Image (cartoon, grey):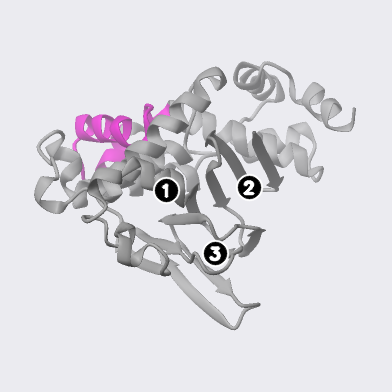
């Protein structure tokens, strides 16, 4: 099952990666905050990660709230009552959530129940809350999920693998963390520089800097920029930018507020023919035919 709702440059996507195991992606690139709601039963354990920006959770009809800041996570579980999602995502913010039944979660860690406190027998019927910092290795997986751009046919397998990888990293004991696998990305400063590079090309997508200009701006050697960007986002800088521009173009067309020429200009194409060719390369159809499919 897969559900996706688009509102201009804000979207919510829900992907089922296994039986009753869901990944929710909240992407708000608009100038306003966006509110997302979803029913979640008491038997689910919830993991929430703020990849960029900030968000707030509301509970009990707004009488209680929890903030979620950039590079932070929340784990929520209350076996005594449902915890429906009422999430306000700030402007220019990304949040990724995982929902899975506590029974399934128990099966993953049955031999380590004493290590994870709320899985122990004396705690299994108690509510649990934990906030934590997102590690650099977790940030890589989260960005790969947010910026997925592989062939659609392998999406379920990819999301399933990354979801379990994220769970493993979340519960990895610091003493056992393997930071030697990729020393460059274990350096938080370098990860922040790569994130800055992505923000720069997105903000200036109509007239992006060259790779050399980008490397100089974030104060990182160009080879480190290319290497780090590929590691975190799974693609080269300009291949990532191309996919991002096409997704923005698709959402702008779907909004119904712009014609093809206007959308092409907004994402950096001076001629309609070049934009049409690029759109067809990405989505296999022309902007006009895409618009027709929305009203069919």
Instruction: Give yes or no for contact between labels 3 and 2 (Cβ–Cβ under 8 Å).
Output: no
Vertically, is 77 above or below 64? above
Check disc 2 and report its element: helix, strand or loop. Answer: strand
What is the crowding at mark 1: few (fewer than 14 residues within 10 Å), some, or many (at least 20)? few
Seen in the image, is 239 located left or right of residue 256? left
Q: Residue 134, image x and y in percent?
A: 30, 55
Residues at marks 2 and 1, CA–CA distance in whole angstroms:
18 Å
Q: Residue 250, image x and y in percent?
A: 68, 34
Residue at 70% over, 37% down: 263
Residue at 55% over, 47% down: 24
Q: Which residue is mark 3?
A: 90
Quadrant in the rendering for residue 164 = top left
Is 182 covered by the magenta stretch?
no
Check disc 1 and report its element: helix, strand or loop. Answer: helix
Residues at marks 1 and 3, CA–CA distance in whole angstroms:
16 Å
Q: Which residue is mark 1?
A: 199
Seen in the image, is 84 located left or right of residue 117? right
Which one is in front, 256 or 115?
Answer: 115
Vertically, is 104 above or below 210? below
Magenta stretch: dominant secondary structure: helix
Numbered range of the magenta stretch: 212-238
Q: Which residue is mark 2?
A: 11
Vertically, is 33 above or below 15? below
What is the crowding at mark 2: few (fewer than 14 residues within 10 Å), some, or many (at least 20)? some
Q: Is residue 218 in view? A: no
The tag earlier along the polypeptide, 3 or 2, is: 2
Name, please, the residue furthest toward the front: 121
Seen in the image, is 4 located left or right of residue 236? right
């Amino acid at each position: 099952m897969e559900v996706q709702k688009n509102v201009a440059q804000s979207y919510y996507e829900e992907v089922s990666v296994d039986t009753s195991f869901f990944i929710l992606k909240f992407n708000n690139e608009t100038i306003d905050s966006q509110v997302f709601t979803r029913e979640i039963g008491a038997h689910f354990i919830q993991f929430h990660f703020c990849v960029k920006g900030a968000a707030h959770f509301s509970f009990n009809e707004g009488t209680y709230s929890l903030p979620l800041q950039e590079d932070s996570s929340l784990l929520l579980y209350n076996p005594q009552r449902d915890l429906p999602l009422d999430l306000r995502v700030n402007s220019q913010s990304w949040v990724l959530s995982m929902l899975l039944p506590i029974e399934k979660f128990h099966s993953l860690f049955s031999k380590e129940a004493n290590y994870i406190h709320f899985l122990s027998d004396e705690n299994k019927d108690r509510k649990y809350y934990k906030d934590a910092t997102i590690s650099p290795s977790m940030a890589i997986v989260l960005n790969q999920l947010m910026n997925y751009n592989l062939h659609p046919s392998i999406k379920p397998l990819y999301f399933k693998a990354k979801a379990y990888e994220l769970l493993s990293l979340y519960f990895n004991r610091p003493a056992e963390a393997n930071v030697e696998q990729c020393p460059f990305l274990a350096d938080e400063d370098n990860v922040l520089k790569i994130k800055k590079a992505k923000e720069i090309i997105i903000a200036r997508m109509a007239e992006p800097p060259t790779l050399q200009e980008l490397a100089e701006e974030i104060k990182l050697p160009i080879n480190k920029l290319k290497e780090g960007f590929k590691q975190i986002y799974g693609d080269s800088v300009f291949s990532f930018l191309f996919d991002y521009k096409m997704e923005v173009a698709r959402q702008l067309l779907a909004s119904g507020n712009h014609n093809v020429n206007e959308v092409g200009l907004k994402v950096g194409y001076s001629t309609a023919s070049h934009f049409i060719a690029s759109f067809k390369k990405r989505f296999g159809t022309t902007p006009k035919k895409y618009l027709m499919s929305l009203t069919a």
